[in-house]
Amino acid sequence: MRRWFDDLPKYADDSSWWPKGTTRCRPEVFLFWLGLPLTIMAYFGVSAFLVLFKGLNQTNMNDYFAFGVWIVVDLAVIALGAGAFFTSFLNYIIGKTELKPIVNAAVLIGFICYTGAILMLGIDIGQPIRGWFGFWHANVHSMLTEVMFCITTYAIVLCIELLPSVLDNRRIGKVPEFGTFSHNLHTIMIVFAAAGTFLSFFHQGSLGGMFGVLYARPFAFRGHLGIWPMTFFLFVMSAIAAGPSFTTLIVMITEKITAKRLTSHKVKMLMGKISGWLLLVYMVCKSVDTLYWAFIYLPSKGLSVGQMYQMPYGSWLVWAELGLFGWLPVVMLLTPRVRESYGLLFLAMLLNCIGVTLNRFIFTIQSLALPVMPFEKFISYLPTWQEWGVASLVLGHGLLIFMLAYRYLPIFPQEPELNQR
Amino acid sequence: MWRKNQVRYGMVIDVDKCTGCGACAVACMSENNVGVLPDETDKIRSITWLRVYQIDNGKPFPDTEVAFFPRPCMHCQGGTSGAPGQAFFQEDTDPQEAHTPCVSVCPAIATDYDDATGIVSQIPTRCIGCRYCVAACPYHARYFNWYDVPWPQGTPRGLSPFVSPRMRGVVEKCTFCYARLQRAKNKAFVGGGKVGEMDYQTACTEACPSGAITFGQLQNPAHKVHKLIQSEFAFRLLEKLGTNPKVYYMSKRKWVRMMADNHLSQAKATQAAASGGHK
């Protein structure tokens, strides 16, 4: 089908950089669409400048809401980016090679999520120049210390895991040194997959542990298994359940935008099945944990569930998190007929991803909104436009990196085969 | 083995004596160089190391009763606390188990627990401003510097030379006027004696016109606070959480005592404290 821009004169030709056997839109069209992420990045730039220059008073955070939308987005994208480590783990270590066609995309999405989260955290702290104190004066008892170490080192692992895709570019790969280096990287990738799995397991868990150890915050505190609170394990489980869904979701959205098939439906169905089973395990544990917290832990502290849910953070959040965005996607993802349908699989994965995001929102915002002090009132919080601007970084830089990677790197090895005319 | 001989500074505030005049809060700000922010009506961002809450019994006139509740940092000990009602300060046998909610979470050791005094310190120049400690504190005793303090011209000359003013982007809180302890120690060192009860008193204690605040060593029988915390009317804020605070309150009014712990029944409170709260 001829499109309106096909008849325009060609000013530049970058087709020699495209992945082998693929076609891409014309450079002018690509440049036009690059305006979208660049606009978002400009919005981020203005917001970040104001926050760094004038301070965190540019936000609506306060001494009651010490954490705000940035931490919610950070926790959510780190959970959604878990598809990178878990798909690599299944592919390289467990030997589930059916996932090979989607591993590159998973690593790329993970890279976007983690780099975005680290950049945002740098703006979120009151003294960004002292960010390195967490490494130099590390408090080994703090869950946040573990998060800082593991996220930073894992981001480096992700860079290494992404490097072969960059070196496999048609033009770059022709340079003999790069080609050899890329080949050697491929052969030792199992080492980085193992390192990534180890690091990810701990920081996903520690992000949950951050809330579970707050023993003076009854909404967040959970009992311990060994030295780790239950939230440590729940966060790991929910991340590995949502990560593969998010990866597949992004691939499906890319397919719709580009009007191309990028991975076979079989791969997507397998990702859905993996997500479904992991989500089932998570939901069983989460439901037991919630019941124990509501009916045993809270009464032991003289509190009731009713006190924990007050408008606008009412009990509807529990039903939404555990029902609509919890058990419903479990049932959907474990039903073969749902997985076979492109639309229903998309919907189930979307519900799964919203569920994990909602969970991170509840642990961050509701934990702080609850007045523990008897003389305090329940207050709510709404972010400022500057906060949304900084939070939109993940979207802006994610779109930018993904668009460039899709155009020039062999992220989807099945694409040439699936789009043969 | 209980570590009963350890020096543990603490405070007893008699709620029935407090008139809510706010002299303690003013003295605290002056002593510790707490600045006045551009908008002090924004109470969820203003800095008051010692905040005076006004509470009431919730009953309509003429049965309404009002009480004032000064709230400094509780200098939580953590670990297994003494059971409510006994009102006796106890420390965990295992110091590793005893951790305050805020100290254990700080990634950069910008807040620390002094084992020699039991005082929870804050090191502003170490703080990275992550605010994890603010989230961890149930008493809202920790304050983040959302603004640079706009010291009016000439006012810096009136600042205390013993306490560093804080910069934007760091957390601060009550330190039991730690600079006063350092001065008392210096004085004792020069004089060849020990730091006596009256050698080290916090600014709020000295400023209180009705004598509602008493400060001293909780485990030293010679100090007044040691006797006061054994009163049947002594209690602590949110005792059930297991934070094991070193700030005690006293009130003969039952509704005040009940309100301090969210109406936790006596039996459940004892059970919660015995389980050590966070273990």
Image (cartoon, coloured by chain):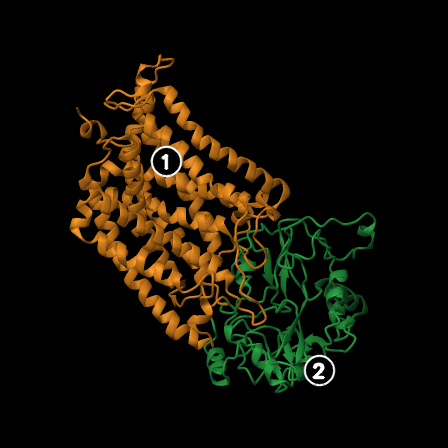
Question: Disc 1 vs disc 2: which is toward the camera?
Answer: 1
What is the residue that sits farthest to the front in this orientation?
B61
> Residue B51 appears at what percent x and percent y?
67, 66
Mark 1: give few (<14), some (14-19) or many (20+) Cα within 10 Å: some
Which residue corresponds to mark 2?
B222
> The numbered mark 2 sits on a residue in which chain?
B
The answer to which image quadrant residue A116 occupies is top left
In this rendering, the answer to whether A132 lies above or below A177 is below
Q: CA distance from mark 1 to mark 2?
A: 65 Å
Query: Tag 2, which secondary structure?
Result: loop
Dot 2 amino acid type = Ala
The answer to which image quadrant residue A158 occupies is top left
Taking the spot 37% from the left edge, 49% from the top edge, the residue there is A79
Mark 2: give few (<14), some (14-19) or many (20+) Cα within 10 Å: few
| Between A218 and A327, the one nearer to me in the picture | A327
Which residue corresponds to mark 1?
A160
Dot 1 amino acid type = Ile
In this rendering, the answer to whether A185 lies above or below A246 is above
Please give left or right for residue A246 compared with residue B103 in the image: left
> Residue A115 appears at what percent x and percent y?
44, 40
Chain identifier, orange in the render: A
What is the residue that sits farthest to the bottom in this orientation?
B232
